Image: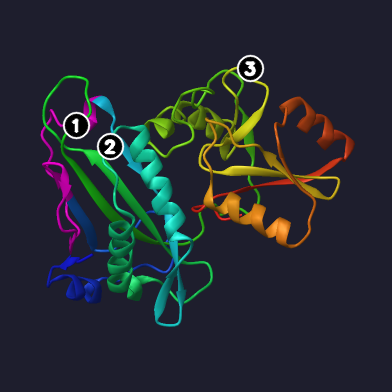
Amino acid sequence: MKIEVHNRCASLIEQTSLPQDLGFGKFFSPVMIECLYRDGDWQTPQLKPYSPLQMDPATMVFHYGQSIFEGLKAYRSGSSLHLFRPVEHAHRFVKSAERLAMPKVPIDMFMESLKAFCRVSAPLVPEDDQSTLYLRPFMFADQVGLGVKPANSYIFMIIGSPSGRYFADQSVKVMIERSLSRAASAGGTGAVKTAGNYASSLLSDRRAKAAGFHQTLWLDSAQGKYVEELTGMNIFFVRNGGLVTPKLTNSILAGITRDTLSFLAKEMDLPFMEEPIAIGDVLNDIRSGVCSECFVCGTAAGI
């Protein structure tokens, strides 16, 4: 898969300076990947200078929400960057596209675009173990017109943000959401990374932060009884010395970090279970000491 690299990209990287305190998602590499889907085919991906997008007011993504994304990290090792499980992210991107009636991005195009972006942007990642290059591949419908239907043209892009820790604090306070739902328990979009899932979480997250919490803990929409996930993270509980996490459903995103921890637990012969977890049982187990701790995990937040 060929990536067309614009000749200004290297000089833009050389001219870019970053503050010592990066925060998360505040600063961006001065380059981006852009690839157009036209007439049923993907064109050649381009690595080009980062720039605003010019969009018609009738662009269909604004009205019908065909938008998906991924989030993954590249870690510095010497003078190069190493991607963590990018192929799994590529496959999840395909799954999201299928659910929203969008064209599949070929795995090799996804991978080669990531590699090209990282090769150029590597100098921007500081040499410390708290900093990474957070990568945001995304795709959206850019056909112009009104009428509810799948679009016939799309744009696939990758931007990247040299970033530090997601949470400044070492601990995370969560609010149990008992009145709103993030995604439908059956037949919805909770198991894919579409923008609408995050839009539906924002009201609850605003309430949570106003009450002094970091994020919302979501329960299933059918009964409001079973633990699902946080807005951007999966959750684990330490119960009687073993790990327990909610069993995947159609409304829980299959996190790459979650899958990694599950694999490592089995490799290390740690007691590990995936099962439906009732919020009432969690609270009782915390009070009794059966549940000694819990933690959240995700690409952006880590563990």
Question: Is 32 positioned to the left or the right of 198 in the image?
Answer: left
- Expressed as whole percent of the image width and height from the top left, the position of residue 77 reads 47, 78
- The Cα–Cα distance between marks 2 and 3, rounded to whole angstroms, is 31 Å
Residue at 65% in and 56% down:
263
Residue 223 shows which numbered tag?
Answer: 3
At mark 2, the secondary structure is loop
Q: Tell me, yes or no, if residue 70 can be seen here.
A: yes
**Residue neighbourhood size for the residue with mark 2, other residues' Cα within 10 Å, grouped as few (<14), some (14–19), many (≥20):** many
Residue 102 shows which numbered tag?
Answer: 2
At mark 3, the secondary structure is loop
Residue at 29% in and 49% down:
105
Front residue of 13 and 94: 94
Question: Is 101 positioned to the left or the right of 269 in the image?
Answer: left
Quadrant showing the C terminus: bottom right
- Expressed as whole percent of the image width and height from the top left, the position of residue 88 reads 46, 54
Q: Is there CB contact under 8 Å for labels 2 and 1?
A: yes
Quadrant showing the N terminus: bottom left
Residue at 27% in and 58% down:
109
At mark 1, the secondary structure is loop
Residue 151 shows which numbered tag?
Answer: 1
- The Cα–Cα distance between marks 1 and 3, rounded to whole angstroms, is 35 Å
Where 33 falls versus 95 (above or below)? Answer: below
Q: Earlier in the sequence, mark 1 or mark 3?
A: 1
Report the span colored magenta.
36-63
- Occupied quadrant, residue 153: top left
Residue at 72% in and 32% down:
277
Instruction: Give the residue type that dot 2 points to.
Output: Met
